[in-house]
């Protein structure tokens, strides 16, 4: 019975690879043979007499030390080191590419519904270490929490932060500044300025109470005259764990309904620095409420 199996056909590239492998193996075998021959010649010549043996011994040393050993290092040891280096480099690149590809830590957290529940706000600032900045038009809901909510739910976390030495700075739009009436008219809110004044009175009451308690942390109230553009709650801007909530005011939409974006300094440092820079500039031109 005739075998119809066709003989294997090798391409030129396959033959080159095969030849390179065979050549490499033969080179190693030949080099090892040279090393053994050189060492053997050196050992044999040690106890021999005659003028030729010392020369043969030196030749044996030369073959083993100068020719064979460097070649063995180049082909075996150095190749192995190179492979280890390349393997480590590959692992490093994989880690870096994986980190770049994983954008989950870079995503901004957005609360599309707007104003957060009181427990969310408290959870966000209760572990503050140094500073808490509140920037708003009136922040009336914030000051209302001191009276309308149970002590343990809101006021107690604020007091505990003050006891730890955390400073609170509240920045409200100045209802007496030249821009106030224009802004209220533009917002079509005739009650806006009285609401701000009422909120300021509430904050003064809270501030004076905390001053009487003489906590290590201070609770301060400021007025700014720039047209309000956003709400911001900034926690520990100087700390690595710095974080903030901000919400841009949109004309025709209630402030309580504008989406709130949560930013962490460690995850979005450039954005975080830009917004904290805005707060610092506004604070520099604000007036302390006595």
Image (cartoon, rainbow, N blue to C red):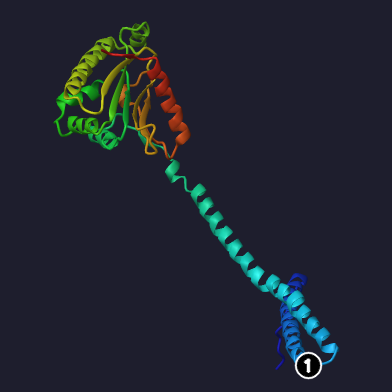
135 or 164: which is nearer to us? 164
Q: Quadrant of the N terminus?
A: bottom right
Quarter location, residue 198: top left
68 or 236: which is nearer to us? 68
Q: Is residue 167 above or below residue 172?
A: below
Q: Is residue 51 above or below residue 83?
A: below
- Left/right placement of residue 100 relative to residue 50 reads left
Q: Hey, which residue is sitting farthest right in the picture?
A: 51
Quarter location, residue 222: top left
Q: Position of residue 146 (x, y in %)?
A: 18, 25
Asked if residue 7 can be seen in this view, the reply is no
Q: Hey, which residue is sitting farthest left in the picture?
A: 150
Task: Write down the residue under mark 1.
Answer: 48
38 or 289: which is nearer to us? 38
Asked if residue 208 can be seen in this view, the reply is yes
Quarter location, residue 128: top left
Q: Quadrant of the C terminus?
A: top left
SS for callout 1: loop
Circle 1 crowding by C-alpha within 10 Å: few under 14, some 14–19, many from 20: few
Q: Position of residue 21 (x, y in %)?
A: 71, 76
- Left/right placement of residue 94 relative to residue 108 reads right
72 or 16: which is nearer to us? 72
Q: Residue at x 26, y 14 (%)?
A: 196
Q: Position of residue 107 (x, y in %)?
A: 43, 40
Q: Residue at x 70, y 70 (%)?
A: 74
Q: Is residue 196 above or below residue 241?
A: above
- Number of numbered markers: 1
Q: Residue at x 27, y 20 (%)?
A: 220
Q: Position of residue 35 (x, y in %)?
A: 73, 82
Q: Residue at x 76, y 72 (%)?
A: 16
């Amino acid at each position: 019975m005739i075998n119809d199996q066709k003989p294997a056909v090798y391409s030129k590239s396959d033959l080159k690879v095969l030849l390179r492998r065979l050549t490499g193996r033969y080179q190693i075998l030949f080099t090892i043979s040279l090393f053994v021959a050189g060492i053997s010649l050196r050992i044999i010549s040690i106890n021999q007499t005659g003028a030729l043996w010392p020369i043969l011994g030196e030749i044996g040393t030369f073959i083993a030390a100068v020719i064979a050993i460097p070649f063995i290092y180049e082909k075996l040891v150095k190749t192995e080191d190179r492979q280890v280096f390349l393997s480590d480099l590959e692992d490093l690149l994989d880690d870096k590419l994986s980190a770049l590809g994983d954008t989950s830590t870079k995503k901004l957290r957005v609360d599309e519904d707007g104003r957060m529940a009181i427990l969310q706000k408290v959870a966000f600032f209760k572990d503050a270490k140094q500073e808490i900045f509140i920037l708003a038009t009136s922040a009336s809901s914030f000051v209302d929490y001191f009276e309308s909510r149970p002590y343990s739910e809101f006021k107690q976390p604020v007091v505990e932060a003050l006891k730890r030495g955390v400073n609170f700075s509240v920045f409200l739009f100045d209802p007496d500044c030249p821009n106030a009436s224009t802004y209220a008219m533009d917002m079509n809110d005739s009650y806006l300025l009285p609401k701000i004044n009422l909120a300021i009175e509430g904050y003064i009451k809270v501030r004076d109470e905390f001053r009487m308690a003489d906590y290590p942390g201070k609770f301060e109230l400021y007025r700014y005259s720039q047209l309000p553009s956003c709400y911001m709650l900034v926690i520990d801007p100087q700390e690595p764990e710095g974080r903030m909530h901000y919400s841009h005011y949109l004309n025709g939409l209630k402030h309580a309904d504008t989406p709130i974006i949560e930013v962490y300094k460690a995850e979005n440092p450039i954005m975080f620095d830009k917004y904290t820079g805005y707060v610092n500039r506004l604070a520099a031109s604000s007036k302390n409420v006595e």
